[in-house]
Image: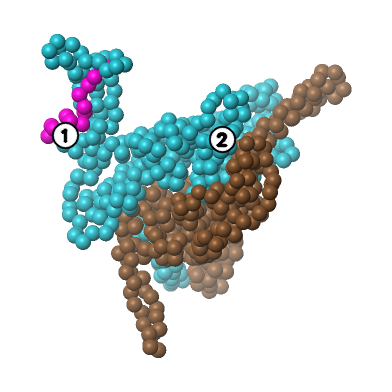
Chain colours: A cyan, B brown
């Protein structure tokens, strides 16, 4: 009797005390998730007089379809010789006319082209903007993840030294993290200004005027780099403190033992510090990758996906453009589901990598 | 016991003097490097704040030299203009209400749920815990669009006094309100998880002693667990506050009207309608500086909290 009565009250209190949170989590996380999957199978709109129609996997088909076309160069009809333009390059028929005329290419648009030998390959997708956004996210991640992680490790090592002022420097390096990325995106638009921006002033100063002024956000070649630099500046301090926690968890005795064995500073770094940071590093790399795929605010504020050709569009930006701006909730939901699957894969890789290290 | 080698090196030999000199040089270089990096991390913020007190013409003149970082002139004109041209006070109020109310509710709601998961025994507990942990991998960006669809179809009770009678009417759609920026974010899987981990480490003997004294589980939570768990309450409060204060994606899609607009959407809109950089930087400073001051006051708590949020995602 004495044993069962607290249990019964446990059950009542358990559900009562948990109810608000469980209800909230269900309504605002699980339910939207289920709605996302359901909507992604329809042509639902945000505001629409007609009920959504079931379209099966149509949204996913549009999102993920890619095909390749091979084009032969144009020949002069009389002589049969290859036509060349004024720069001596081969001329090809316009891909758009072929994509439009042939039924099997219905709904496809040119994404990009590759010339190999005297053939041109046209890679076409049903949603080239999505493909371009995915490519941008991958590029962003491939630069930010190694650069930011190693920078953060370097910062952590610097401020982990037993020197006066280390804490002050740690605070300074961390301070951008607590600022709003929205506000900083606006401020950096000014810093990136072609004529009056401080970034170009620094570039001019360092290169003694040798490098011309870069039109950071107005040029397709530099716009993504501008977003990358801002993003690293904003978040490096965050990874730094995670590395710091990792560094401080390495037992001091390992360093002492290494010193007694005659290891110099470099050897201590390679044989004690780095192996001790293995799990922290896996963790930092994974969360930085996930953050890279969540890229949205910088794009929305600084470039709106431009300056042209969707040069800086990201997956989340495209989802919001489709699902909110254009009101295509069904299609936007399909993008959200694909986005979630990407993030889930990255998380599973993390789990796998950490589990492997646990067995060592 | 063999002495540690470096301790038994002679102190006055010439070779050590040379080594000392190298060590000093190393120290100087260290500080040069640390300061250089500090400049890189600080200059946008310093430039923003200093320039907000200059007229735009002066800002554009000063960027040519180091004057960009010096208070060459001082005027509050930019701040005056921001208040005159926009509903800044309203947006500030909205952001403050959204952040504080979410923080307060989420401390209560999530800690109670975590207590139920960590310290009580009930049917379905293991399943709920598994679901909560699984939800940690769901980034908000993945549910923003369907959540928008959902809240547009939810009803919200509105109390009104109509001819002496208190009437409750149902208002359709949560869009363009403050509660659409609060309610969906109160229950938070990550906060539950942080509380849960902390509560697990509190010795169970304490509960059992209280149980013998006849205390109910809620009383144990309120009198025993909450007072013992100040650090984790601080962590959740800081994280939730920063997420709400700095959020842009959700208010950008769920709030169109000025009535419920927070500061982040405010500055984005202001920037879109305005080309006066002095005023834009004044606006930016007013959003950033209060948070930076709070950060500097409680930096240890901030850094520890945000480091623990690395678990998210």
Residue B288, position in %: x, y?
A: 58, 52
Q: Quadrant of the N terminus of chain B?
A: top right
Residue under the image location 35 percent in, 49 percent down = A320
* Residue A165 visible within the image: yes
Residue at image mark 2: A199
For label 1, the crowd category at 10 Å Cα-Cα, with few meaning under 14, some 14 to 19 and many 20 or more, is some
Residue B229, position in %: x, y?
A: 58, 60
Q: Secondary structure at mark 2?
A: helix
Nearer to us in this view, B170 or B265 = B265
- Up the image or down, A143 lies above or below A292; here it is above
* Residue A34 visible within the image: no
Q: Residue furthest right?
A: B12
The picture quadrant where one finds residue A117 is: top left
Q: Are marks 1 and 2 in contact (CB under 8 Å)?
A: no
The picture quadrant where one finds residue B183 is: bottom left
Nearer to us in this view, B189 or A216 = A216
Horizontal relation, residue B6 to residue A15: left or right = right
Residue under the image location 57 percent in, 58 percent down = B81
- Up the image or down, B162 lies above or below A88; here it is below
Q: Residue furthest front?
A: B57
Residue at image mark 1: A100
Which of the numbered marks, if any, corresponds to residue B63? none
Residue B113, position in %: x, y?
A: 45, 62
Q: Secondary structure at mark 1?
A: helix
Residue under the image location 21 percent in, 61 percent down = A49
Q: Residue furthest bottom?
A: B164
Residue A140, position in %: x, y?
A: 43, 35
For label 2, the crowd category at 10 Å Cα-Cα, with few meaning under 14, some 14 to 19 and many 20 or more, is many
Whether discs 1 and 2 lie on one chain: the answer is yes
Range covered by the magenta-colored residues: A89-104
Badge 2: chain ID: A
Residue under the image location 36 percent in, 79 percent down = B168
């Amino acid at each position: 009797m004495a044993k069962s009565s607290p249990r019964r009250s446990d059950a009542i209190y358990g559900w009562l005390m948990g109810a608000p949170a469980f209800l909230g989590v269900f309504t605002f996380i699980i339910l939207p998730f289920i709605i996302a999957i359901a909507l992604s199978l329809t042509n639902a709109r945000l505001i629409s007089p007609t009920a959504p129609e079931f379209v099966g996997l149509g949204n996913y088909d549009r999102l993920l379809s890619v095909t390749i076309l091979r084009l032969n160069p144009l020949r002069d009809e009389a002589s049969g010789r290859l036509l060349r333009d004024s720069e001596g390059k081969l001329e090809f028929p316009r891909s758009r006319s072929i994509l439009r005329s042939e039924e099997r290419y219905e709904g496809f648009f040119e994404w990009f082209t590759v010339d190999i030998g005297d053939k041109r390959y046209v890679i076409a997708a049903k949603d080239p903007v999505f493909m371009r956004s995915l490519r941008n996210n991958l590029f962003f991640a491939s630069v930010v993840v190694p650069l930011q992680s190693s920078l953060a490790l370097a910062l952590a090592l610097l401020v982990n030294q037993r020197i006066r002022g280390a804490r002050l420097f740690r605070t300074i390096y961390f301070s951008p993290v607590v600022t709003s990325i929205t506000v900083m995106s606006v401020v950096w638009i000014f810093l990136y200004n072609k004529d009056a921006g401080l970034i170009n002033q620094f570039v001019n100063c360092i290169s003694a005027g040798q490098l011309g002024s870069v039109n950071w956000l107005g040029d397709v070649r530099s716009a993504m780099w501008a977003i990358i630099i801002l993003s690293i500046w904003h978040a490096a301090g965050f990874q730094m403190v995670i590395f710091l926690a990792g560094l401080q968890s390495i037992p001091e005795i390992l360093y002492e033992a290494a010193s007694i064995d005659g290891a110099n500073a470099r050897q201590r770094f390679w044989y004690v510090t780095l192996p001790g940071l293995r799990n922290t590093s896996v963790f930092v790399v994974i969360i930085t990758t996930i953050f890279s795929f969540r890229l949205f605010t910088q794009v929305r504020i600084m470039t709106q996906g431009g300056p042209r050709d969707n040069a800086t569009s990201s997956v989340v930006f495209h989802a919001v453009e489709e699902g909110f701006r254009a009101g295509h909730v069904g299609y936007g939901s399909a993008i959200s589901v694909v986005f979630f699957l990407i993030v889930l894969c990255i998380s599973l890789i993390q789990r796998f990598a950490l589990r492997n290290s646990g067995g060592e | 016991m063999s002495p540690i080698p470096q301790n038994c090196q002679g102190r006055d030999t010439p070779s050590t003097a040379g080594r000392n000199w190298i060590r000093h040089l190393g120290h100087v270089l260290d500080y040069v490097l640390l300061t250089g990096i500090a400049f890189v991390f600080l200059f946008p913020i310093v430039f923003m704040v200093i320039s907000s007190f200059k007229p735009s013409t002066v800002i554009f003149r000063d960027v040519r030299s180091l004057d960009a970082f010096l208070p060459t002139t001082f005027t509050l004109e930019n701040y005056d203009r921001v208040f005159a041209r926009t509903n800044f006070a309203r947006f500030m109020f909205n952001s403050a209400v959204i952040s504080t109310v979410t923080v307060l509710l989420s401390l209560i709601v999530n800690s109670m749920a975590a207590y139920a998961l960590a310290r009580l025994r009930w049917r379905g507990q293991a399943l709920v815990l598994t679901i909560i942990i699984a939800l940690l991998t769901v980034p908000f960006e993945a549910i923003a669009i369907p959540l928008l669809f959902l809240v547009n179809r939810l009803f919200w009770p509105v109390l009104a006094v109509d001819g002496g009678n208190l009437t409750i009417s149902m208002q359709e759609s949560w869009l363009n309100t403050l509660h659409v920026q609060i309610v969906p974010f109160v229950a938070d899987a990550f906060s539950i998880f942080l509380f849960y981990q902390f509560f697990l480490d509190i010795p169970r003997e304490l509960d059992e002693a209280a149980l013998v004294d006849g205390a109910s589980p809620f009383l144990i939570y309120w009198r025993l667990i909450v007072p013992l768990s100040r650090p984790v309450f601080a962590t959740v409060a800081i994280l939730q506050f920063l997420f709400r204060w700095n959020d842009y994606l959700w208010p950008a899609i769920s709030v169109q009207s000025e009535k419920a607009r927070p500061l982040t959407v405010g500055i984005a809109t202001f920037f879109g309608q305005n080309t006066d950089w002095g005023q834009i930087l004044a606006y930016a400073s007013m959003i950033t500086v209060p948070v930076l001051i709070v950060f500097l006051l409680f930096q240890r708590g901030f850094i520890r909290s945000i480091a623990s949020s690395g678990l998210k995602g």
